[in-house]
Amino acid sequence: MAGWITRNSSVTEGQEVAWDVTLNRMSGTVRIAVVGDFNPEYPTHHAINASLQHAAEGLGLRMDSKWVATSCAERGADKIFRNYDGLFIASGSPYRSMHGAFEAIRLARVERLPLIGT
């Protein structure tokens, strides 16, 4: 995976090393918190679940992803996300709690957790 990253000129050597450490830390099962307000009527929300599963399989890992409502993230981001390997900020705004979505993003930045948003 790191070989792909090195071809992206916007990724620094330090970021590549951090990615390698993250991949090496993950073994067996990867835990991803999907931050958003799940709506079964949104095809994109189902696609997020499927894409995370597909990515884990490609890395030879098991996926344990959980949707975390933005209102929950607002009340306890520090406690909720400490046991996850990374965060995925789901599509589908407006969120019930924009502050909760921002709290999840803030925590990922401060704790250097992998984060992706759509």
Image: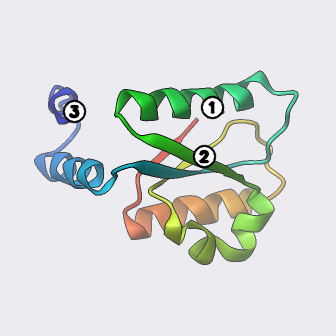
Which is nearer the N-term, disc 2 or disc 1?
1
Residue positioned most to the left = 13
Name which residue lies at 60% across and 47% down: 65
The residue tagged 3 is 5
The figure's colour scheme reads rainbow
Alpha carbon distance from label 3 to label 1? 22 Å
Q: Which amino acid does label 3 sit on?
A: Ile
- Image coordinates of residue 33 in percent, x first then y, are 59, 53
x and y percent of residue 89 in the render? 60, 46
Question: Which residue is outermost to the right?
Answer: 41
Mark linked to residue 48:
1
Q: What residue type is labelled 1?
A: Ile
The answer to which of 114 and 55 lies nearer the viewer is 55
Could you tell me residue 18's position as x and y percent?
22, 54
Q: Is mark 1 on a helix, strand or loop?
A: helix
Residue depicted at x 20% and y 48%: 20
Mark 1, residues whose alpha carbon is within 10 Å: few (<14), some, or many (≥20)? some
What residue is at 59 percent from the left and 62 percent from the top? 104
Residue 5 appears left or right of 60 = left
Q: How crowded is mark 3: few (under 14 residues within 10 Å), some or many (20 or more)?
A: some
Residue topped by disc 2:
89
| Disc 3 + disc 1, Cβ < 8 Å | no
In this rendered view, identify the residue nearer to me: 19 or 106.
Answer: 19
